[in-house]
Amino acid sequence: MSVSVTKLDNGLNVVTESMPHLETTALGVWVKAGSRDENQNQHGIAHVLEHMAFKGTAKRSAKQIAEEIENVGGDVNAATSVETTAYYARVMGEDVPLAADILYDILANSTFDEEELTREKHVILQEIGASQDMPDDLVMDMFQKSAFSDQAIGRPILGTPETVQSFTSGDIKTYLDSHYHGPNMVLAAAGCVNHDALVKQAEETFASFQSELPEPSESANYVGSEEIIERDFMEAQMVLGFEGRAYHVRDFYASQLLASILGGGMSSRLFQEVREKRGLCYSVYAFHWGFSDTGVFGIHAATGADDLKELVPVILDELKRASEDISQAELDRARAQVRAGLMMSMESPAARAGQIARQLLLFGRQIPNEELMERLNALSIERIRDLAGRMFCEGNVTLTAIGPTKNMARINDVSAHLGLKPANAAE
């Protein structure tokens, strides 16, 4: 397998990874623009744009877009995240030109018809409503909001019913024109693909996007706060978190390993102590999300009202212990998990295309797997312990929960347990 990269004159990168043993191709356009690139009155517009891109262009109706890709056995979809939006397809190798043309068409020539927009708003409002009925998703939105209060990076990706209802086709076009510029975009493909042919097609189409760099997103400021909501659910969903590390900083990979050690599987500390030994909950895991200029480290757990009071102190004790006695076996296991995940992802062309696209957007280059493993192998026990001490015992806490939360510890209780200064809990 080999990776080839060509930058067009307008700054858009075309990157391919040939996987000769495959007859299919995964390709897509990744844009370095997501929910954090919205201003207050645009909340949710990145996600609305993702939906509306498939609702008709100057030369294809919404039905024709679906039929053309499905006539060749392919599929097309899209996804919006905090910092990126992706539009992607999976087709047979000989149908790459068709898929690439459709992707270009929906991004460059969408009409954003007002009648289609009215119908799609209704769909998105149902999506927002459904998210409110899913406590595990809702508590994560609460967590992001509490970690980054009053900032775009902390707002839910879906937007609100009020903001979504307010958008016009002109608003969507303005957002697209402001952020979908060549230097902010990558056309990536993996599988059965000819790099030179895809570059030639991109030069005839995607070169039309602006070459100027768009305005940068607002810098993130991790704050940390509390939101606890009493609801009549069977169990309480809670997330306890701290400031994580950005993709570019020294401790990013150490944070990934620390999350794995604490809550990355059934052998992790939290799973063994909280579930297996004490039976305090059904689900508990740790995660680390890196962004371009910040990050969040969190522990999610779901448990019944009677066990909630005991659950939080046990988790906090495990966090404190991580700064003192991580073993070589635990570190080796975490490395093996990351390495296996990396290797498994290489077997999927869709995952490979997404990985190299995001690397180009974030780092400006493709990072070989060997380099990633070198970084992981260089991490010592002392480094992970030191990070745990600084992350859990020096910064601000974020605490969110929803469900039967009457026995829930408050943020000042958590701070005191960790030896931190009292936090100012949100009203």
Image (cartoon, grey):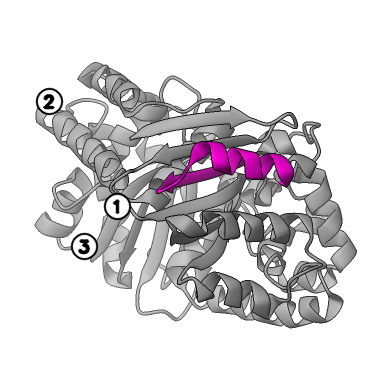
Residue displayed at 29% across by 24% down: 370
Question: Residue type at mark 3?
Answer: Leu
Residue displayed at 46% across by 61% down: 91
Q: CA distance from mark 2 to mark 3?
A: 27 Å
Q: Is residue 399 above or below residue 364?
A: below
Q: Is residue 301 above or below residue 38?
A: below
CB atoms at circles 1 and 3 under 8 Å apart?
A: no
Question: Residue type at mark 1?
Answer: Tyr
Residue displayed at 33% across by 59% down: 301
- Would residue 317 be seen by someone viewing this image from the given angle? no
Question: Residue type at mark 2?
Answer: Gln
Say the numbered circle drawn on residue 280: 3
Range shown magenta: 186-205
- Would residue 19 be seen by someone viewing this image from the given angle? yes
First along the sequence among labels 1 and 3: 3
Using residue 76 as the reference point, say whether residue 150 is left or right of it.
Answer: right
First along the sequence among labels 2 and 3: 3
Residue displayed at 37% across by 46% down: 287
Using residue 405 as the reference point, say whether residue 294 is left or right of it.
Answer: right
Dot 3: within a 10 Å radius of its alpha carbon, few (fewer than 14), some, or many (20 or more) residues? many
- Comparing 32 with 132, the one in front is 32
CB atoms at circles 2 and 3 under 8 Å apart?
A: no
Asked if the magenta segment contains residue 204, the reply would be yes
What residue sits right under mark 2 in the picture?
328
Single out the mark in the foreground, 1 or 3. Answer: 1
Q: In the rendering, at what x and y percent does residue 11 appear?
A: 70, 30
Q: Quadrant of the N terminus?
A: top left
- Comparing 230 with 238, the one in front is 238
